[in-house]
Image (cartoon, grey):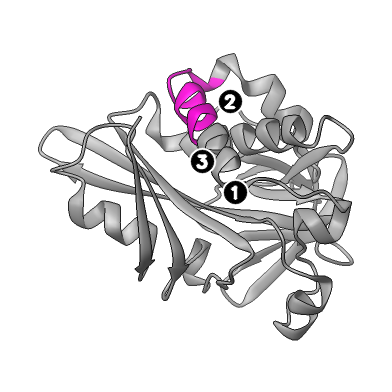
Amino acid sequence: MKTIFLDETDSTNNYLKSHCNELCDQTTVTAQRQTAGKGRMGHSWADSSGMLPFSVLLKDPVEPQNISARVGLAVCETLENALLRKFSVKIKWPNDIILENHKVCGILCESVRFGECLNVICGIGVNISQSEDYFIGAGLPNAGSVLSLTGEVLDRSTLLEEISERVIFRSKMPFKECFEEYKSRVINLGREVKIIRKNTEKTAFAEDISENGCLICRDENGLFEVNSGEVSVRGKEGYI
């Protein structure tokens, strides 16, 4: 595993997209500062010195269509281990990482095809040490950092290495081999949720996860599947 350290870049995902043909599989890139980070569905990705932004290049991974679920699982496992299992880390479907009911990590996986090879770039941003005041000032009341939520100080370099290694490990596994572990961490299950698609909202009951990683919901018309690329899912009364 090769790691590239940058002082500044627009986005670590963009860096890997621009250089993926010349870089080897499993290359990780991180930066002290991102000027144009982005999240799912075009949302901006707030940058600060307390966040660890990085991306991992996976060339022709197993089942690329649900790689983000396995990346989310890898982040949960690593954070729990780093916190000595004193705290539980969950997933708000499909891949927001939740600690103490706050989002501490966002994930954006993007595909880049080169000939017959499909590369997947896994962008990850972990909130390590920002203060509670930082999130209030940034208008992010549902977010938090590991430090603000637990009082624990995590080493940036160690966390980067351990999450990257875990992402690579999980990326080699078929989803069915970690399906139950992923499902057990999804905090939305068994709750009423709001499904937000562009300018429309509907309420449903989040019942299960399908074998391909979709959220199975039920409303007055019966069961239906929700694809992570199409929507945002929140709790009926709030973020979770």
Relative to 96, is 101 on the left or the right?
A: right
Disc 2 residue type (three-letter) = Glu
Q: Which mark is residue 68?
A: 3
Gap between marks 1 and 3, in whole Å?
22 Å
Q: Under tag 1, what secondary structure?
A: helix
Q: Quadrant of the C terminus?
A: bottom right
Q: Which residue is mark 2?
A: 211
Label whose residue precedes the other's in the sequence (1 or 3): 3
Circle 1 residue: 156
Task: Mark 2: give few (<14), some (14-19) or many (20+) Cα within 10 Å.
Answer: few
CB atoms of marks 2 and 3 within 8 Å:
no
Q: Is residue 218 left or right of residue 36?
A: right
Q: Is residue 129 visible?
A: yes
Q: Amino acid at mark 1?
A: Arg
Residue 203 visible from this viewpoint: no
**Mark 1 or mark 3, which is nearer to you?**
1
Q: Nearer the viewer, residue 32 or 146?
A: 32
Residue 98: % across, % down: 76, 49
2 or 3: tag closer to the N-terminus: 3
Residue 104 is situated, as x and y percent measured from the top left of the image, at 71, 55
Magenta-span inclusion, residue 212: no
The residue that appears at 48% across and 18% down in the rendered structure is: 174
Q: Residue 190 got which mark?
A: none
- Quarter-of-image position of residue 224: top right
